[in-house]
Image: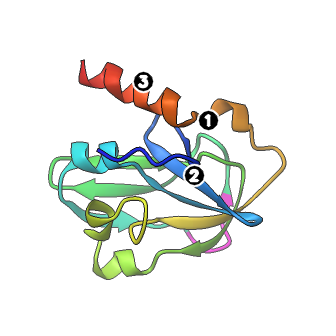
Amino acid sequence: MEFPEGFYYTKDHEWVRKEGDEVVIGITDYAQQALGDIVFVELPADGGDLRQGDPFGSVEAVKAVADLFSPIVGSVTAVNLDLEDNPGLVNASPYGDGWIIRAKVDEATHWDELLDVLAYQELVKGLEG
């Protein structure tokens, strides 16, 4: 299972990677493995507002449907349209081609509510028992 460093993580298994003045958001390797084969990703509208902790879309897999919760406050600047034709990109490359949205971050984001890689690894270790 991959746990890339330099990312921020949520307790709901989303990840955030800073790129310049924007961030890229997706779901973690743990989440995609727990869900199984992903068959559909509901994407938010480009330009839509994001509120930290609020749902912005969902991921439908063979096993279940999971809401996506925004790790930041901001606005969507791009959505990964490749997921419309190939939602399995999230399974194949959760931290790369399977990214879900790009966003501009608002100063109201509480970065201290997000987890670093070590804290996220501990969270997953606790879930796996």
**Residue 109: horizontal and vertical position, in percent?**
75, 43
Q: Identify the residue shown where x is 81% and y is 44%.
A: 108
Q: Which mark is residue 88?
A: none
Q: The N terminus appears in which quarter of the rendering?
A: top left
Label 1: few (<14), some (14–19) or many (≥20) C-alpha neighbours in 10 Å: many
Q: Which residues are magenta?
A: 45-49
Q: The C terminus appears in which quarter of the rendering?
A: top left
**Residue 116: horizontal and vertical position, in percent?**
57, 35
* Image quadrant assignment for residue 91: bottom left
Q: Which mark is residue 16?
A: 2
Q: What separation in Å lies between label 3 and label 2 (alpha carbons)?
A: 18 Å
SS at mark 1 in the image: loop
**Residue 45: horizontal and vertical position, in percent?**
57, 71
Q: Earlier in the sequence, mark 1 or mark 3?
A: 1
Circles 3 and 2 in contact, beta carbons < 8 Å: no
Q: Earlier in the sequence, mark 3 or mark 2?
A: 2
SS at mark 3 in the image: helix
Q: What separation in Å lies between label 1 and label 2 (alpha carbons)?
A: 9 Å
Q: What separation in Å lies between label 1 and label 3 (alpha carbons)?
A: 13 Å
Which residue position holds label 3? 122
The one of 6 and 129 positioned closer to us in this rendering: 6
Q: Amino acid at mark 1?
A: Leu
Which residue position holds label 1? 114
